[in-house]
Structure formats: C-alpha cells, structure tokens
C-alpha cells in the first residue's frame, strides 16, 4: 500500500515539474495561451508512466524509507526527502527505480547535477526504463535547454509511444526550440492518443497558430469547444478565430453562447455586438455593444462600433455621443474622427463637423486602433 501512495505523491511532484512543458510558461498567442493558462496542468497525461515506474514489483519501492520520502514531500520538506532518497540509493545501489526516485526528488529541489547523474545511472542499469529519460528532459528544460531536452523525450516516446504527455512535452520543446512544424506533428500525435482531452487540442491549436495555419488553429480549437461546450473561454477563442478569418456570421454562435456563460465579459459583448452589427442584425448588436460599454467604459473600440451601429439605425445623436467618447479614448484613431464628423453633419452641426473632419485629415490615413485598444 505504501509504495502505491509513494507513486501517487511523486506523480504529483513530477506533474508539477512538467509545468515546464505546459503552455503556462509560453506567450506565443495571447488569446490561446491565456486560455491554456486557466487549465490545470495535465497530470493525467504524465501520470501513467510515472505510476508504472514506481509501482513496479521492486523491493526498493517497498522499503520503509519510501514512505518517509512521501511524508517529507507532503510536508514540502524537499531537503529531507532528498536526504532520504540518497539513503535509499545507498541501500539499493544498483536499483534503477531507487535511482529514478532520487533523481526526481533531486530535480524538485533543483539539484540538477545530482538529478542528471541519478537518471543516467538508472538508464545504464535499465536502458528501457522510460522515466529516467523523461527526468533528463525535465532537467534540460528547467534550464531552458529545450533542444537538448528533445532527444531524451524522443527516447521516452519510443519507450512509451502511447503517452500523450510525452508527445505534448515534445511539442512544447520543439516550439520553444523553433521547430514549429515538428511541434504540430507531435501535438497531433497527442490528439490521436487522447482525442477526448481538451488540453491536447488546445496545445495543437497553439502549435498550428505558431506556423500561421489559421484554418488548422480553428479546427483544433473548435474540437476543444465540442469537448467543452460550456467553457466560455474556449468558445470565445473560437469566436475570435472566426473574426480573424473574417467569417463573422460563424463567429456569432460561439460568442453568443460565451456571452450567456460569461455575462460580465465586456470583450465578448463587444465582439459579439460588432459581428451582429456587421452582418445586418443592428439592434441585437447595439444591445451587446451597450453592455460592453457599460462593463468597460474606457474601452475605445466598443464606443467606435456602437457609434457605427447607431449610425446604421439612424440614431445620430446617440452616435455623436459614442464617437465623442471614442475620440476621447483614442484621439489618434482617424476613423473615429471621420465618423464623428459624419454624425455631426447628420444632426445639422456643420461647424463641429468641419472641426472633426479637419482633425481626421491631420491624422495618418489607414491608421489602426492602438494595440491596447483592439478587440
């Protein structure tokens, strides 16, 4: 029983270390990575090989010292755990499982040299034991040597070809090492192994995004949405992906559902309102744009789009107020000044219309909204 407990606790420790391979530490794509950062680390993707390694019928793992290591780790006494792990390898000097456990504990305490030597000695004794190879990859990745981690992970997946966690780790390291196409290949292997795991599809979406494959990104994130139909964050990314592809009608259903699930997310309302207004559903668009403006009154784009919607519905005085707010927040955005001028003219205020037009002409043509203001 105690060696099973050890496996569970050390599996958690290793899963925590495996955050090095998860998207939490990346920033390749703001929306997808922000979404991934909200997900739990994929312990389930790395736990099986860890459990197999530590639940092996091995006398070293039934030694009372193992229970003491578990207790020390539970108390977060990593130094004490490492001291006990050293005692274990002294007691079992040629035991690969004991050496692997020592390596993992040394890794958690950031004793990388000791961790590496323990893993390598374990491999020398038992070359086909998978976890020491994974451990060596952890050590390299912890020191930002992602290219150096990849050969160890490649050996790991040779020994554990059905480990989605191994393929995801490879995908992460490949992307960090600049091997973007390889990252896609490895992430696809993970989705084939665990097609029902949301995390695998999101990581594939990130990899596809890094290669510039917008259709592939959308397919992957849409699959994630199918698996989590009530996850507002995933639905939001699906909607944004359609907007980026200029497929506004298709963005409306996921954003509508996201707005129901996250009614206080101003950006969802702003983007949904924009899509509705742009596809002819002006009144519905105004409703969501108004909600977005109420939730985030200093977010410039929502006032710009609300002003456009008011113009389309003939509500020019309200359009004036919206565009005045937009120009105050985004004074360098030429289009808002031009729209404001048009709305002034529609209300009969010629003098203000001329001043707004002059301001618009003084700004660069074709200027985009400031990045921090974009939806």
Image: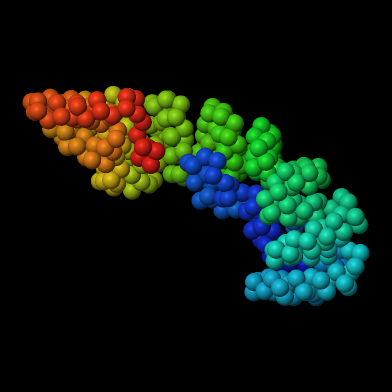
Please state the horizontal and vertical placement of residue 18, each as a whole percent of the image: 66, 54
Please state the horizontal and vertical placement of residue 321, each as a whole percent of the image: 17, 37
Quadrant position of residue 108: bottom right
Count the marks.
0
Observer-nearest of 184 and 117:
117
Residue at 52% in and 40% down: 29
Observer-nearest of 257 and 249:
249
156 w.r.t. 74: above or below? above
Q: Residue extending furthest left?
A: 348
Please state the horizontal and vertical placement of residue 371, each as a whole percent of the image: 39, 38
* Relative to 298, 222 lies left or right: right
- Mark yes or no: residue 144 visible: yes
84 w.r.t. 27: above or below? below
Observer-nearest of 53 and 367:
367
- Mark yes or no: residue 4 visible: no
Quadrant position of residue 373: top left
Residue at 28% in and 45% down: 298
Observer-nearest of 295 and 324:
324
308 w.r.t. 87: above or below? above
Q: What is the quadrant of the C terminus in the image?
A: top left
Q: What is the quadrant of the N terminus in the image?
A: bottom right
* Relative to 344, 41 lies left or right: right
Please state the horizontal and vertical placement of residue 315, each as a whole percent of the image: 15, 30
Residue at 49% in and 42% down: 30
């Amino acid at each position: 029983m105690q060696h099973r407990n050890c496996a569970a606790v050390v599996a958690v420790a290793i899963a925590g270390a495996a955050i090095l391979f998860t998207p939490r530490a990346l920033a390749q794509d703001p929306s997808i990575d922000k979404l991934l950062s909200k997900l739990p680390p994929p312990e389930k993707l790395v736990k099986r090989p860890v459990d197999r390694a530590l639940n092996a019928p091995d006398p070293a793992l039934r030694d009372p010292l193992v229970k003491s290591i578990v207790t020390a780790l539970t108390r977060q006494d990593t130094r004490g755990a490492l001291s006990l792990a050293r005692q274990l390898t002294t007691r079992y000097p040629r035991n690969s499982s004991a050496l692997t456990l020592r390596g993992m504990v040394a890794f958690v305490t950031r004793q990388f040299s000791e961790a590496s030597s323990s893993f390598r000695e374990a491999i020398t004794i038992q070359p086909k034991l998978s976890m020491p190879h994974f451990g060596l990859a952890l050590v390299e990745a912890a020191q930002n040597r992602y290219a150096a981690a990849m050969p160890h992970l490649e050996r790991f997946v040779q020994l554990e070809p059905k480990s989605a966690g191994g393929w995801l780790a490879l995908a992460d390291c490949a992307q960090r090492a600049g091997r973007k196409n390889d990252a896609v290949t490895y992430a696809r292997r993970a989705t084939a192994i665990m097609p029902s795991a949301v995390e695998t599809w999101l990581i594939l979406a990130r990899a596809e995004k890094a290669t510039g494959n917008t259709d592939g990104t959308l397919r992957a994130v849409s699959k994630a949405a199918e698996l989590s139909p009530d996850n507002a964050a995933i639905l939001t990314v699906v909607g944004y992906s359609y907007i980026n592809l200029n497929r506004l009608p298709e963005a409306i259903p996921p954003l509508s559902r996201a707005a129901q699930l996250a009614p206080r997310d101003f950006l969802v309302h702003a983007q949904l309102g924009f899509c509705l207004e742009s596809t002819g559903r002006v009144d519905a668009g105004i409703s969501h744009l108004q909600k977005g403006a109420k939730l985030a009154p200093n977010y410039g784009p929502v006032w710009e789009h609300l002003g456009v919607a008011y113009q389309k519905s003939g509500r020019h005085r309200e359009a004036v107020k919206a565009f005045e707010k937009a120009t105050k927040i985004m004074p360098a955005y030429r289009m808002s000044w031009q729209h404001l001028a048009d709305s002034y003219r529609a209300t009969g205020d010629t003098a203000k219309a001329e001043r707004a037009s002059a301001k618009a002409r003084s700004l660069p043509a074709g200027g985009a909204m400031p990045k921090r203001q974009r939806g």
